[in-house]
Image (tube, rainbow, N blue to C red):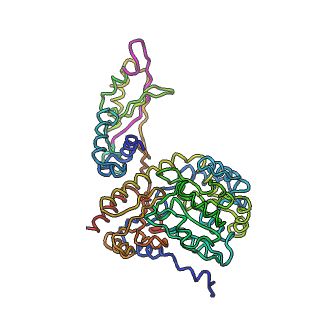
């Protein structure tokens, strides 16, 4: 077993596992786990630990949109340069370069549709290299990062069986 | 109504009593479950649904759909070096349980002795008895890592048996046997002309080393029936689908029983199984890796509690020594005080006494809580 790979897989499954439990599951000791996590963080492999939230069950559902961006490149400007101009906006939750009919795929999050629209039209679209944006408002989320939102999770097995 | 003597001789399963005790209580975390907590992979379920939509609701060939037998033969050859002809040497059944029952009825005559390695799954002894045979329990010991040994076979009278049945990776101990460990068993079987019934239902859930099948050892193929199925590795227990691999004359004999009783294995499940073999390997790997983590977790927790626990290497059970001499009393008290269900080992036959079967086919959060409760109970 590759402890490093297995540790990443465990943290992806549940970033709140304690180091003690991680050590138990990996069959190693706590200090080894702590050290590995520290190394992974120092190397920039582990970037953060976040919760997966089903916003519908809260009173403050943010508005989210997927924004497709087309860009034109020239000798002085590459994808990374354009990304650098966008990445700092807190409204942009994710920013990815993708293959296919458009170039960048953004997830934009704000408190209202108006805010998202204004952000796209005032901050994203005016970037000189961006030739076109298409905004898709997110209507319903069924699954995020591998977690199904409406799975019943009921255990209907017999409580004791051979 | 008159009940047959064969049936009267078989007591109700000891599992049943614990099931009833557990059902009476609220907020129980059960570590007493002998099936996966995962759901069958969606791709396989989807294939089952699709088969229903296309109206595939008739019987299949007695031996199972040709496409399924071919897929089973191919997988068995690739993974376990078990080379069987899909037309003549594969029988698809309603769970491995049916295959095993059919084998007892096909190979056991009234009065025949059948050696049963124990502790074991609870169906072998009743199955032999229903077939009119005489079960001969062969205990395995923690000192031998719960492996079956030729000495135990000799000592407990397997030499004049007609057949030997065992299961590795083992329910309830989690023990496995390597090729080297199986060699003396194979030699014993050849020497005493035993038919070997090898229940390998947990083969895909082997965590340390590779699963070895006794049928691959010299001179064993012609005397061995291998049982496997989709219940454990593919989390398809309720779909009831298993199979037997054996030489043509053995499959023909088993099929004669099967065709007059089950007729054919559930058609919907066969469609799911074809898909499972074609498309679900990544999910089987993922489930195996989840079980393996839990196995290490549970073993560490028992170690921390100072409970002696053999290092299980397969299936999804560990088999610790009971902290009290009376394992049944311990299991009952634990259930009563902390709402954690485990199964006392003597339910699984000789060699199981003084132990507890703890299943880790349970989500990590519940498993963690259950182990905390056991620790609290011991304090």
- The quadrant holding residue B321 is bottom left
Asked whether residue B234 is in view, the answer is: no
Q: In this view, does B361 lie to the left or right of B55?
A: left
Residue at position x 35%, y 36% in the image: A113
Q: Is residue B37 left or right of residue B167?
A: left
Task: Indicate whether residue A71 is drawn in magenta.
Answer: yes
Q: How many labels does the image show?
A: 0
* Residue most extreme to the bottom: B1
Q: In this view, does A7 lie to the left or right of B254?
A: left
- Is A112 drawn above or below residue A151 in the view shown? above
Task: Indicate whether residue B85 is drawn in magenta.
Answer: no
Write down the region rendered in magenta. Answer: A62-80
Q: Quick one: B313 or B53, which is closer to the camera?
A: B313
- Quadrant location of the N terminus of chain B in the rendered image: bottom right
In the rendered image, residue A104, in percent from the top left (x then y), is placed at: 43, 27
In the rendered image, residue A94, in percent from the top left (x then y), is placed at: 37, 33
In the rendered image, residue A136, in percent from the top left (x then y), is placed at: 43, 35
Residue at position x 30%, y 27% in the image: A88
Q: In this view, does A137 lie to the left or right of B195?
A: left
Residue at position x 50%, y 48% in the image: B285
- Is B195 drawn above or below residue B135 in the view shown? above
Q: Quick one: B204 or B188, which is closer to the camera?
A: B188
- Quadrant location of the C terminus of chain B in the rendered image: bottom left
In the rendered image, residue B325, in percent from the top left (x then y), is placed at: 36, 74
- Is B177 drawn above or below residue A95 in the view shown? below
Q: Quick one: B55 or B15, which is closer to the camera?
A: B15
Asked whether residue B182 is in view, the answer is: yes
* Residue most extreme to the left: B379
């Amino acid at each position: 077993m590759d402890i490093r790979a297995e540790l990443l897989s465990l943290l992806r499954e549940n970033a709140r596992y304690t180091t003690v439990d991680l050590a138990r599951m990996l069959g190693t000791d706590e200090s080894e786990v702590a050290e590995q996590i520290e190394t992974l963080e120092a190397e920039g492999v582990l970037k953060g630990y976040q919760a997966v939230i089903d916003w519908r069950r809260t009173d403050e559902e943010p508005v989210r949109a997927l924004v497709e961006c087309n860009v034109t490149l020239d000798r002085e400007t590459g994808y990374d340069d354009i990304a650098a101009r966008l990445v700092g906006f807190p409204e942009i939750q994710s920013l990815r370069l993708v293959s296919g009919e458009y170039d960048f795929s953004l997830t934009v999050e704000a408190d209202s549709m108006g805010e998202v629209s204004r952000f796209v039209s005032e901050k994203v679209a005016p970037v000189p290299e961006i030739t076109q944006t298409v905004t898709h408002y997110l209507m319903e989320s069924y699954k995020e990062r591998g977690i199904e939102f409406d799975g019943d999770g009921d255990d209907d097995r017999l409580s004791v069986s051979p | 109504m008159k009940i047959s003597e064969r049936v009267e001789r078989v007591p109700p399963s000891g599992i049943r009593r614990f099931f009833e005790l557990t059902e009476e209580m609220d907020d129980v975390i059960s570590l007493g479950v002998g099936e996966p907590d995962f759901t069958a992979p969606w791709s396989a379920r989807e294939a089952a649904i699709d088969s229903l939509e296309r109206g595939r609701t008739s019987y299949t060939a007695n031996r199972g759909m040709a496409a399924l037998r071919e897929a089973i033969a191919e997988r068995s050859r690739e993974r376990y070096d078990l080379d069987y002809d899909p037309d003549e040497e594969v029988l698809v059944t309603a769970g491995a349980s049916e295959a095993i029952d059919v084998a007892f009825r096909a190979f056991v005559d009234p009065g025949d002795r059948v050696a049963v390695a124990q502790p074991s799954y609870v169906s072998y002894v009743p199955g032999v008895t229903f077939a009119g045979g005489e079960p001969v329990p062969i205990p395995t010991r923690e000192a031998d890592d719960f492996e079956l040994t030729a000495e135990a076979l000799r000592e407990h009278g397997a030499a004049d048996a007609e057949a030997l049945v065992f299961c590795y990776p083992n329910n309830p101990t989690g023990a496995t046997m390597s090729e080297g460990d199986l060699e003396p068993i194979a030699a014993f079987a050849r020497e005493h002309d035993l038919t070997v019934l090898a229940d390998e239902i947990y083969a895909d859930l082997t965590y340390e080393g590779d699963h070895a099948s006794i049928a691959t050892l010299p001179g064993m193929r012609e005397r061995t029936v291998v049982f496997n199925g989709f219940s454990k590795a593919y989390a398809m227990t309720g779909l009831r689908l298993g199979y037997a691999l054996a030489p043509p004359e053995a499959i023909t004999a088993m099929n004669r029983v099967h065709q007059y009783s089950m007729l054919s294995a559930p058609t919907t499940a066969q469609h799911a199984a074809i898909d499972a073999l074609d498309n679900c390997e990544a999910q089987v790997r993922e489930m195996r890796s989840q079980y393996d983590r839990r196995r290490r977790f549970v073993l560490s927790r028992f170690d921390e509690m100072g409970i002696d626990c053999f290092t299980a290497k397969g299936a999804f059970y560990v088999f610790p020594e009971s902290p009290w001499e009376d394992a049944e009393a311990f299991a009952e008290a634990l259930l009563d005080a902390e709402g954690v269900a485990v199964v006392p080992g003597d339910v699984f036959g000789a060699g199981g006494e003084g132990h507890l079967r703890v299943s880790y086919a349970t989500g990590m959060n519940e498993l963690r809580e259950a182990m905390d409760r056991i620790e609290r109970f011991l304090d």
